[in-house]
Image (cartoon, grey):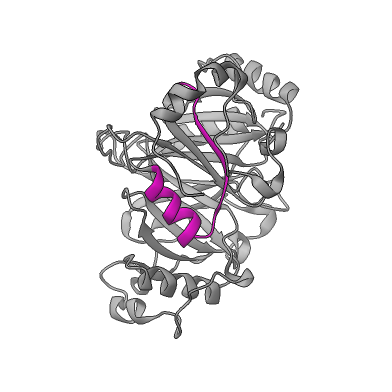
Amino acid sequence: MPSLATAGFHHVTMVSSDARRTLAFYRDLLGVGLVKRTVNFDDPTSYHLYFGDATGSPGTILTFFEWGNVAHGHWGVGGVHHLALGVATPEAQLMWKRRLNDAGVAVSGPFDRGWFRSIYFRDPDGQVLEIATRGPGYAVDEPIEALGRIELAPPTSAEIRGARDEAAIAARTWPEPVPVITLDMALEGIHHVSAITSDLERLNDFYDSALGLKLVKKSFNQDDPGTKHWFWASYDGAEVKPHSALTFFGWPRGGRPARGGVGQMHHLAFRAASADEQLAWRDHLLSLGVSVSPVMDRSYFQSIYFRDPDGLLLEVATDGPGFTIDEEIATLGTELRLPAWLQSEREQIEAGLQPLQV
């Protein structure tokens, strides 16, 4: 058992074809603030936008590479199926359904997943998104001290796609328009990320030993009951920490591999509290035979990169120094920020980027 255990997600990074459209969707429609406008340090010809809460706290951060010349990808083994953002209550979730529908975004649900309720939709590039409620939580059908120890029964017919009352579900929404995002419906950051694997048992060994994530639920996919659906999280036997749940659908061996590109997740980043802890993570991963990158300076955090057994790209990122290192909180995201080593190229970089309305 590892002595290290991540506290959960630091950020997730996706691929966008158009930074302006991404800004309009995530900031203006979903109300997730732009906390940093910079470039991809490995490809400074393209934007790297960071969204999150007021200060860009770990667990709330969504980032996007703008790669307009890259083809659309698709989900599959070794890739992410969808990203779920959290919301406090089922009522707030219905408010989101109405707000999205009124903006012309197709929404399915709400569906009762047992541990939370879910609605689904896509961003302008096709990335599958979910808004999931905070509760009732993973201890609703197992003791909190014994999560994930047994495989739960398959879902009932009332929960299975094709057998449930789809018309009634589709009709359920908020009765009034929602032109303004109120405090009680504000999104709460990353609820969970769902990916696809060809071997759940192998992944259980990896995520437990490599990142200290614990199995908290062994269940079945309600939309495909022949597929198992397992959940891992930062869990100490008494609490499942927020912003930490990573779930996998178990596909049979030989299933379609994921293809990266626009509308897909590029990588998932987990938290390290400090640079010293990150170095300990690197040593720990190397001791397990995992190939790990050197530490990379991302200005707002330090990063190391590696892959899980299915090829999913992972990162361990430090909590600091944070996004206020080069901007005040009140002005986060309002200007293009570049690291010191790119300042000499600012004029050329700015000339190649489309202007953003911030």
Q: Residue at x 36, y 71 (%)?
A: 101
Q: Up-down: is 351 above or below 172?
A: above
Of 259 and 350, nearer the camera is 350
Of 58 and 76, nearer the camera is 58
The image quarter containing residue 285 is: top right
The image shows residue 139 at horizontal and vertical percentages of 62, 61
Q: Is residue 197 magenta?
A: no
Q: Specify the segment rendered in magenta.
A: 19-43
Q: Up-down: is 309 above or below 128?
A: above
The image quarter containing residue 129 is: bottom left
Left or right, 171 with respect to 40, comes to left
Q: Up-down: is 150 above or below 296?
A: below
Of 27 and 157, nearer the camera is 27
Q: Residue at x 40, y 68 (%)?
A: 100
The image shows residue 256 at horizontal and vertical percentages of 24, 37
The image shows residue 232 at horizontal and vertical percentages of 55, 45
